[in-house]
Amino acid sequence: MIEKTNSVAIHVRRGDYLIARDMYGGICTENYYIDSMEYMKQHIRNVHFFVFSDDMEWCRFFLDKKENVTFVDINDEDTGCFDLILMSKCQNMIMANSSFSWWAAWLNKYEGKIIIAPKRWNNHTNDTNIFCAEWVRPY
């Protein structure tokens, strides 16, 4: 399905980020994901979203009513490398502020891809050097 659709990977990282809210909290909010999905819908015809997360239960609750969404929940911590591969195979991506997201976006080889990245990486630095110049960072 990833190769046969106008695919967008959505990476939602929660897990340990919920514990370290002072470092990572308030960056990839529900509004970040909603606004990013709307941006993709405005720029890509017949878009299909593929959700990858360490908290799929939250994603299903939050995104279940959205159209053209597939929850990729076939991997766990031991096979998470396959999620990385699958995310990199999507034509476009909505990143979390996570190195896992960063690598999937960086490994994406599609010409004309849209990668949406959060405005901040964490709450303690203002380092923007981590983002590639062509990545969209409107939120």
Image (cartoon, rainbow, N blue to C red):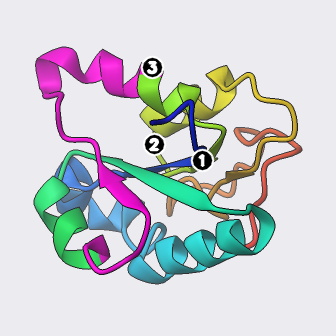
Residue 125 is situated, as x and y percent measured from the top left of the image, at 60, 55
101 versus 14 height, above or below: above
Q: Amino acid at mark 2?
A: Ser
Q: Which residues are magenta?
A: 63-85
| Residue at x-position 17% and y-position 75% | 61
Q: In the figure, is residue 91 to the left or right of 67? A: right
Residue 32 is situated, as x and y percent measured from the top left of the image, at 53, 75
Residue 54 is situated, as x and y percent measured from the top left of the image, at 21, 45
Dot 1, how many residues are within 10 Å of its Cα: few (below 14), some (14-19), or many (20+)? Answer: many
39 versus 91 height, above or below: below
| Residue at x-position 73% and y-position 63% | 45
On the rendered image, what quadrant is the N terminus found in? top left
Considering only order in the chain, which callout, 3 or 1, is on the residue closer to the N terminus?
A: 3
Label 2 or label 1, whichever lies nearer to me, is: 1
**Structural distance between the alpha carbons of marks 2 and 1:** 13 Å
On the rendered image, what quadrant is the C terminus found in? bottom right
| Residue at x-position 70% and y-position 38% | 130
Number of the label disc, if any, that sits on residue 98: 2
